[in-house]
Image: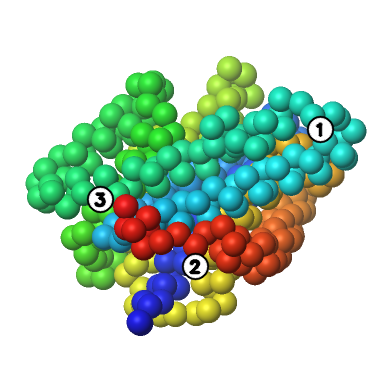
Amino acid sequence: MNIKKRNSSIELLRIISMIMIIVSHCSVHGLKELNSTIFINNIIRDIFTLGNLGVTIFVIITGYVSYGKNIKISKIIKLEFQVIFYSLILYIISSIIMHTNILSIDLVKSIFPIIFKKYWFISAYIILYLFVPYINMIIDKFDNDILKKLITTNIVLVFIIPTITTSDLFFNELFQFISFYLVGAYIKKYNINVINKKKQINILMICICIFLISSTIIIEFISFKFQFLKPYSTYFFNRNSIFILMLAICIFLKFISIEEYNCDIINNISSTTLGIYLIHDNPNFRSILWNNINLEKYFNKTYFILIIILTVIIIFIVCFVIEFIRKNIIEKLIDKRFLKLNERSDNM
Protein backbone atom coordinates (compact mmCIF):
# COMPACT_ATOMS: atom_id res chain seq x y z
CA MET A 1 0.00 0.00 0.00
CA ASN A 2 1.38 3.42 -0.97
CA ILE A 3 1.42 5.90 1.90
CA LYS A 4 1.33 9.54 0.82
CA LYS A 5 4.30 11.38 2.27
CA ARG A 6 3.78 14.57 4.19
CA ASN A 7 4.15 17.92 2.47
CA SER A 8 7.40 19.30 3.92
CA SER A 9 6.41 22.93 3.38
CA ILE A 10 3.58 22.42 5.89
CA GLU A 11 5.87 20.47 8.21
CA LEU A 12 8.42 23.29 8.03
CA LEU A 13 5.71 25.73 9.08
CA ARG A 14 4.88 23.42 12.00
CA ILE A 15 8.52 23.66 13.11
CA ILE A 16 8.46 27.45 12.75
CA SER A 17 5.26 27.68 14.81
CA MET A 18 6.93 25.72 17.64
CA ILE A 19 9.97 28.02 17.47
CA MET A 20 7.56 30.95 17.85
CA ILE A 21 6.14 29.31 20.97
CA ILE A 22 9.61 28.83 22.50
CA VAL A 23 10.51 32.45 21.68
CA SER A 24 7.34 33.58 23.41
CA HIS A 25 8.13 31.51 26.50
CA CYS A 26 11.50 33.25 26.71
CA SER A 27 9.55 36.47 27.09
CA VAL A 28 6.61 35.27 29.19
CA HIS A 29 8.44 32.87 31.55
CA GLY A 30 12.03 34.03 31.27
CA LEU A 31 11.48 37.75 31.83
CA LYS A 32 8.12 37.92 33.58
CA GLU A 33 7.17 41.54 34.39
CA LEU A 34 10.66 43.02 34.18
CA ASN A 35 11.46 46.33 32.51
CA SER A 36 14.78 46.99 30.84
CA THR A 37 16.66 50.26 31.08
CA ILE A 38 17.20 49.86 27.32
CA PHE A 39 13.91 50.82 25.65
CA ILE A 40 14.49 48.70 22.55
CA ASN A 41 14.88 45.58 24.72
CA ASN A 42 11.37 46.12 26.09
CA ILE A 43 10.09 46.35 22.54
CA ILE A 44 11.95 43.18 21.54
CA ARG A 45 10.52 41.33 24.54
CA ASP A 46 6.99 42.42 23.60
CA ILE A 47 7.34 41.65 19.89
CA PHE A 48 8.77 38.24 20.76
CA THR A 49 5.41 37.34 22.33
CA LEU A 50 4.80 35.12 19.32
CA GLY A 51 3.37 32.11 21.13
CA ASN A 52 -0.25 32.88 20.28
CA LEU A 53 0.65 33.23 16.61
CA GLY A 54 2.50 29.90 16.79
CA VAL A 55 -0.44 28.17 18.49
CA THR A 56 -2.90 29.56 15.94
CA ILE A 57 -0.80 28.35 13.01
CA PHE A 58 -0.25 24.95 14.66
CA VAL A 59 -3.99 24.29 15.03
CA ILE A 60 -4.82 25.64 11.57
CA ILE A 61 -2.32 23.10 10.23
CA THR A 62 -4.13 20.40 12.22
CA GLY A 63 -7.43 21.40 10.59
CA TYR A 64 -5.88 21.38 7.13
CA VAL A 65 -4.12 18.03 7.57
CA SER A 66 -6.87 16.22 9.52
CA TYR A 67 -9.88 17.17 7.41
CA GLY A 68 -10.90 14.28 5.18
CA LYS A 69 -8.91 11.77 7.22
CA ASN A 70 -10.02 9.02 9.55
CA ILE A 71 -8.72 9.90 13.03
CA LYS A 72 -7.63 6.61 14.53
CA ILE A 73 -8.10 5.79 18.20
CA SER A 74 -4.53 4.50 18.27
CA LYS A 75 -3.24 7.99 17.41
CA ILE A 76 -5.16 9.58 20.28
CA ILE A 77 -3.91 6.90 22.68
CA LYS A 78 -0.31 7.44 21.54
CA LEU A 79 -0.73 11.15 22.08
CA GLU A 80 -2.14 10.53 25.55
CA PHE A 81 0.80 8.24 26.44
CA GLN A 82 3.23 10.90 25.23
CA VAL A 83 1.65 13.58 27.42
CA ILE A 84 1.51 11.33 30.51
CA PHE A 85 5.11 10.21 29.97
CA TYR A 86 6.55 13.72 30.03
CA SER A 87 4.14 14.97 32.67
CA LEU A 88 5.07 12.19 35.10
CA ILE A 89 8.80 11.97 34.36
CA LEU A 90 9.35 15.73 34.58
CA TYR A 91 7.26 15.94 37.75
CA ILE A 92 9.49 13.32 39.41
CA ILE A 93 12.68 15.03 38.17
CA SER A 94 11.52 18.45 39.35
CA SER A 95 10.49 17.04 42.74
CA ILE A 96 13.96 15.53 43.19
CA ILE A 97 15.71 18.76 42.14
CA MET A 98 13.46 20.94 44.34
CA HIS A 99 13.55 18.45 47.25
CA THR A 100 9.77 18.35 47.48
CA ASN A 101 7.53 15.45 48.44
CA ILE A 102 6.81 13.32 45.37
CA LEU A 103 3.73 11.73 46.98
CA SER A 104 1.44 14.75 46.79
CA ILE A 105 -1.69 15.85 44.95
CA ASP A 106 0.57 17.04 42.12
CA LEU A 107 1.51 13.42 41.48
CA VAL A 108 -2.14 12.62 40.77
CA LYS A 109 -2.41 15.67 38.52
CA SER A 110 0.72 14.59 36.67
CA ILE A 111 -0.73 11.12 36.05
CA PHE A 112 -3.90 12.73 34.66
CA PRO A 113 -2.49 15.87 33.01
CA ILE A 114 -5.33 16.30 30.52
CA ILE A 115 -8.11 16.15 33.11
CA PHE A 116 -6.32 18.56 35.45
CA LYS A 117 -5.20 20.82 32.58
CA LYS A 118 -1.51 20.65 33.44
CA TYR A 119 -0.82 21.85 29.91
CA TRP A 120 -3.64 24.14 28.76
CA PHE A 121 -2.60 23.69 25.13
CA ILE A 122 -2.49 19.89 25.18
CA SER A 123 -5.75 19.58 27.11
CA ALA A 124 -7.57 21.68 24.51
CA TYR A 125 -5.71 19.96 21.65
CA ILE A 126 -6.60 16.40 22.67
CA ILE A 127 -10.24 17.29 23.36
CA LEU A 128 -10.31 18.92 19.92
CA TYR A 129 -9.02 15.64 18.47
CA LEU A 130 -11.89 13.77 20.11
CA PHE A 131 -14.36 16.06 18.33
CA VAL A 132 -12.55 16.03 14.96
CA PRO A 133 -14.58 13.14 13.41
CA TYR A 134 -17.83 14.95 14.24
CA ILE A 135 -16.51 18.35 13.12
CA ASN A 136 -15.45 16.78 9.82
CA MET A 137 -18.93 15.28 9.37
CA ILE A 138 -20.49 18.71 9.88
CA ILE A 139 -18.07 20.31 7.41
CA ASP A 140 -18.90 17.60 4.85
CA LYS A 141 -22.65 18.23 5.16
CA PHE A 142 -22.43 22.04 4.96
CA ASP A 143 -22.18 23.73 1.59
CA ASN A 144 -19.82 26.63 0.91
CA ASP A 145 -22.26 29.40 1.88
CA ILE A 146 -23.33 27.84 5.18
CA LEU A 147 -19.73 26.99 6.12
CA LYS A 148 -18.66 30.55 5.34
CA LYS A 149 -21.43 31.91 7.57
CA LEU A 150 -20.44 29.55 10.38
CA ILE A 151 -16.77 30.56 10.20
CA THR A 152 -17.64 34.26 9.86
CA THR A 153 -19.92 34.11 12.92
CA ASN A 154 -17.14 32.35 14.84
CA ILE A 155 -14.58 34.98 13.82
CA VAL A 156 -16.88 37.86 14.84
CA LEU A 157 -17.67 36.36 18.25
CA VAL A 158 -14.29 34.84 19.11
CA PHE A 159 -11.90 37.38 17.56
CA ILE A 160 -13.35 40.67 16.34
CA ILE A 161 -15.54 41.54 19.35
CA PRO A 162 -12.83 40.52 21.90
CA THR A 163 -10.23 42.59 20.03
CA ILE A 164 -12.45 45.68 20.03
CA THR A 165 -14.01 45.35 23.49
CA THR A 166 -11.40 43.32 25.51
CA SER A 167 -14.26 40.93 26.43
CA ASP A 168 -13.74 37.25 25.64
CA LEU A 169 -17.52 36.55 25.69
CA PHE A 170 -16.79 33.57 27.97
CA PHE A 171 -15.24 31.53 25.17
CA ASN A 172 -12.40 29.22 26.17
CA GLU A 173 -9.35 27.69 24.49
CA LEU A 174 -11.31 24.75 23.09
CA PHE A 175 -13.76 27.05 21.33
CA GLN A 176 -10.85 28.98 19.85
CA PHE A 177 -9.18 25.75 18.71
CA ILE A 178 -12.37 24.66 16.96
CA SER A 179 -12.38 28.04 15.19
CA PHE A 180 -8.76 27.54 14.05
CA TYR A 181 -9.57 23.99 12.94
CA LEU A 182 -12.55 25.19 10.88
CA VAL A 183 -10.34 27.70 9.06
CA GLY A 184 -7.76 25.04 8.17
CA ALA A 185 -10.42 22.53 7.15
CA TYR A 186 -12.21 25.11 4.98
CA ILE A 187 -8.97 25.92 3.15
CA LYS A 188 -8.47 22.18 2.55
CA LYS A 189 -12.07 21.44 1.48
CA TYR A 190 -12.23 24.21 -1.11
CA ASN A 191 -8.56 24.05 -2.06
CA ILE A 192 -8.03 27.77 -1.38
CA ASN A 193 -5.06 28.89 -3.45
CA VAL A 194 -3.31 32.25 -3.35
CA ILE A 195 -0.71 31.69 -6.05
CA ASN A 196 -2.24 34.54 -8.07
CA LYS A 197 -2.73 36.74 -5.02
CA LYS A 198 0.75 36.63 -3.50
CA LYS A 199 1.18 40.39 -3.80
CA GLN A 200 -2.05 41.10 -1.91
CA ILE A 201 -1.15 38.57 0.79
CA ASN A 202 2.32 40.10 1.18
CA ILE A 203 0.88 43.62 1.51
CA LEU A 204 -1.66 42.44 4.09
CA MET A 205 1.06 40.65 6.11
CA ILE A 206 3.31 43.73 6.04
CA CYS A 207 0.44 45.99 7.14
CA ILE A 208 -0.48 43.68 10.03
CA CYS A 209 3.15 43.41 11.17
CA ILE A 210 3.59 47.20 11.01
CA PHE A 211 0.42 47.65 13.07
CA LEU A 212 1.44 45.07 15.70
CA ILE A 213 4.94 46.50 16.10
CA SER A 214 3.72 50.11 16.06
CA SER A 215 1.02 49.44 18.66
CA THR A 216 3.61 47.86 20.95
CA ILE A 217 6.05 50.77 20.58
CA ILE A 218 3.34 53.37 21.16
CA ILE A 219 1.85 51.63 24.21
CA GLU A 220 5.33 51.00 25.69
CA PHE A 221 6.22 54.67 25.21
CA ILE A 222 2.97 56.01 26.66
CA SER A 223 3.20 53.61 29.61
CA PHE A 224 6.20 55.56 30.91
CA LYS A 225 3.69 58.24 31.87
CA PHE A 226 0.59 56.08 32.34
CA GLN A 227 1.74 52.93 34.11
CA PHE A 228 -1.70 51.28 33.94
CA LEU A 229 -1.17 50.79 30.19
CA LYS A 230 1.94 48.64 30.68
CA PRO A 231 0.08 45.27 30.73
CA TYR A 232 -1.51 46.18 27.39
CA SER A 233 1.75 46.51 25.45
CA THR A 234 1.11 43.09 23.84
CA TYR A 235 -2.68 43.40 23.75
CA PHE A 236 -2.96 42.89 19.99
CA PHE A 237 -0.76 39.77 20.23
CA ASN A 238 -3.46 37.91 22.20
CA ARG A 239 -4.69 34.56 20.90
CA ASN A 240 -8.20 35.98 20.35
CA SER A 241 -6.83 39.00 18.46
CA ILE A 242 -8.24 39.30 14.95
CA PHE A 243 -4.83 40.57 13.81
CA ILE A 244 -3.06 37.41 15.00
CA LEU A 245 -5.68 35.24 13.28
CA MET A 246 -5.34 37.19 10.03
CA LEU A 247 -1.54 37.02 10.16
CA ALA A 248 -1.64 33.27 10.89
CA ILE A 249 -3.97 32.65 7.94
CA CYS A 250 -1.76 34.73 5.62
CA ILE A 251 1.38 32.86 6.69
CA PHE A 252 -0.36 29.51 6.29
CA LEU A 253 -1.64 30.41 2.80
CA LYS A 254 1.87 31.46 1.81
CA PHE A 255 3.31 28.09 2.83
CA ILE A 256 0.65 25.93 1.16
CA SER A 257 1.18 27.88 -2.06
CA ILE A 258 4.72 26.47 -2.19
CA GLU A 259 5.01 23.53 -4.54
CA GLU A 260 4.77 20.30 -2.56
CA TYR A 261 8.03 18.56 -1.77
CA ASN A 262 9.26 15.90 0.62
CA CYS A 263 12.25 16.22 2.92
CA ASP A 264 12.81 13.47 5.48
CA ILE A 265 14.90 15.74 7.72
CA ILE A 266 12.16 18.37 7.96
CA ASN A 267 9.46 15.74 8.46
CA ASN A 268 11.42 13.97 11.22
CA ILE A 269 12.05 17.22 13.07
CA SER A 270 8.40 18.23 12.64
CA SER A 271 7.23 14.95 14.17
CA THR A 272 8.97 15.93 17.44
CA THR A 273 7.42 19.41 17.80
CA LEU A 274 4.69 18.36 20.22
CA GLY A 275 7.28 16.59 22.37
CA ILE A 276 9.46 19.72 22.32
CA TYR A 277 6.51 21.66 23.72
CA LEU A 278 5.77 19.03 26.39
CA ILE A 279 9.37 19.08 27.62
CA HIS A 280 10.25 22.76 27.73
CA ASP A 281 6.86 24.01 29.00
CA ASN A 282 6.14 21.36 31.60
CA PRO A 283 4.47 23.29 34.48
CA ASN A 284 6.59 21.55 37.14
CA PHE A 285 9.89 21.80 35.29
CA ARG A 286 9.31 25.27 33.80
CA SER A 287 10.54 27.32 36.77
CA ILE A 288 13.70 25.20 37.06
CA LEU A 289 14.46 25.69 33.37
CA TRP A 290 14.04 29.47 33.31
CA ASN A 291 15.73 30.03 36.68
CA ASN A 292 18.80 28.22 35.40
CA ILE A 293 18.81 29.98 32.04
CA ASN A 294 18.37 33.28 33.88
CA LEU A 295 17.58 35.59 30.96
CA GLU A 296 16.96 38.42 33.41
CA LYS A 297 20.67 39.17 33.82
CA TYR A 298 20.96 39.83 30.07
CA PHE A 299 17.88 42.04 29.81
CA ASN A 300 19.89 45.27 30.12
CA LYS A 301 22.59 44.19 27.68
CA THR A 302 22.89 45.40 24.09
CA TYR A 303 23.34 41.81 22.91
CA PHE A 304 20.06 40.73 24.55
CA ILE A 305 18.50 39.64 21.24
CA LEU A 306 21.46 37.34 20.51
CA ILE A 307 21.01 35.67 23.90
CA ILE A 308 17.33 35.06 23.11
CA ILE A 309 18.19 33.50 19.73
CA LEU A 310 20.89 31.28 21.27
CA THR A 311 18.54 30.22 24.08
CA VAL A 312 15.79 29.23 21.62
CA ILE A 313 18.22 27.22 19.48
CA ILE A 314 19.61 25.32 22.48
CA ILE A 315 16.15 24.57 23.94
CA PHE A 316 14.88 23.38 20.58
CA ILE A 317 17.88 21.11 19.89
CA VAL A 318 18.02 19.56 23.39
CA CYS A 319 14.26 18.90 23.46
CA PHE A 320 14.39 17.54 19.90
CA VAL A 321 17.07 15.01 20.87
CA ILE A 322 15.10 13.89 23.95
CA GLU A 323 11.86 13.48 21.97
CA PHE A 324 13.65 11.76 19.09
CA ILE A 325 15.05 9.16 21.50
CA ARG A 326 11.62 8.69 23.12
CA LYS A 327 9.94 8.20 19.74
CA ASN A 328 12.46 5.64 18.56
CA ILE A 329 12.69 3.63 21.78
CA ILE A 330 9.74 4.09 24.15
CA GLU A 331 7.06 4.82 21.55
CA LYS A 332 8.06 1.80 19.46
CA LEU A 333 7.85 -0.32 22.58
CA ILE A 334 4.36 1.03 23.29
CA ASP A 335 3.35 0.42 19.66
CA LYS A 336 4.45 -3.17 19.99
CA ARG A 337 2.93 -4.03 23.36
CA PHE A 338 0.01 -1.72 24.06
CA LEU A 339 -1.26 -0.11 20.87
CA LYS A 340 -2.11 -3.12 18.68
CA LEU A 341 -5.74 -2.17 18.28
CA ASN A 342 -7.86 -4.13 15.81
CA GLU A 343 -9.24 -2.60 12.62
CA ARG A 344 -12.67 -2.27 14.10
CA SER A 345 -11.39 -0.05 16.91
CA ASP A 346 -9.40 2.06 14.49
CA ASN A 347 -12.45 2.66 12.33
CA MET A 348 -14.79 3.73 15.14
Residue 226, image x, y percentages:
59, 18
Badge 1 local density, few (<14 within 10 Å), some, or many (20+)?
A: some
Mark 2, mark 1: which one is toward the viewer? 1
- Few, some or many C-alpha atoms within 10 Å of disc 2 (few <14, some 14-19, many ≥20)? some
Tell me the kind of residue under disc 3. Answer: Asn
For disc 2, the marked residue is: 12
**How much space separates mark 2 and mark 1, taking CA atoms?**
39 Å
2 and 1 marks in contact (CB < 8 Å): no
Mark 2 or mark 3, which is nearer to you?
A: 3
Residue 269 drawn at (x, y percent): 58, 68
| Number of residues whose C-alpha sits closer than 10 Å to that of mark 3, classed few (under 14), some (14–19) or many (20 or more) | some
Quadrant for residue 35, please give it.
top right
Q: Residue at x 23, y 41 (%)?
A: 151
Classify the position of the N terminus by image quarter: bottom left
Spatial CA span between label 2 and label 3? 25 Å
Name the residue tied to disc 3: 136
Between 171 and 254, the one nearer to me in the picture? 171
| Depth check, front residue: 84 or 219 | 84
